[in-house]
Amino acid sequence: MRLHVPVPVRWSDLDAYEHVNNARMLTLLEEARIAAFWSDPDADAPTAVLETGPGAPTVTLVAAQRVEYLAQIPYHREPLDVELWIGKLGGASLQVFYEVYSPVGEQPRTSYVRAATTIVLADRESGAPRRINDSEREAWLPYVEEPLTFRQQ
């Protein structure tokens, strides 16, 4: 099962070529990941179980990222449709996969980006990796699917 997270393109995400800048794409992926996994009392996301903010006991560290660009992303008034899922759920890490599409309802549906981020959970005080706990694992297991295969390995 995949999560669908709407992520707006901001005017400042565009570069001189009038498409989303590659460095800004990492920020858009981060926005989707935060919406999907970080707890928010105002959101109804079953996977958003990581406590966040200053003083939270856990920090999430990006260990690796890979982005494959399929098409240029122009400015859209409606948010992009970012599909997320977990390709690997390890002891202290998870690998999040993304497929970024044109806004919901826009035809034809355009696939813009495929990406992966490896996240390591760490204890805030010690900085050491910490195990994924039972409630996190339970919330995330329904969203584990096959990892993406990128065009060039």
Image: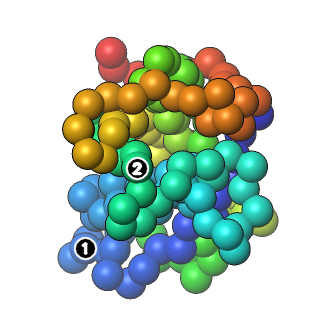
Q: Which of labels 1 and 2 is toward the front?
A: 2
Where is residue 5, by image quadrant?
bottom right
Residue toward you, 58 or 119: 58
Q: Residue at x 74, y 49 (%)?
A: 46
Tell me which colouring the rendered structure shows.
Answer: rainbow
Where is residue 63, by image quadrant?
top left
Picture disc at residue 91: none
Q: What residue is disc 2 on? A: 57
Left or right: where does residue 40 sit relative to residue 68? right
Gap in angstroms between the C-alphas marked 1 and 2: 37 Å
Left or right: where does residue 89 sit relative to residue 144? left
Amino acid at the residue labelled 2: Pro
* Residue 109 visible: no
Please report contact status of discs 1 and 2: CB closer than 8 Å, yes or no.
Answer: no
Residue 74 % position (x, y): 45, 70
Q: Quarter holding the N terminus? A: top right
Q: What residue is disc 1 on? A: 15
Amino acid at the residue labelled 1: Asp
Category of crowding for the residue at label 2, using alpha-carbon neighbours closer than 10 angstroms: few (below 14), some (14–19), many (at least 20): few
Disc 1 secondary structure class:
loop
Residue 25 % position (x, y): 36, 57
- Residue 11, above or below 85: below
Q: Residue at x 54, y 22 (%)?
A: 89
Where is residue 67, by image quadrant?
top left
- Residue 107, above or below 59: below
Residue toward you, 7 or 38: 38
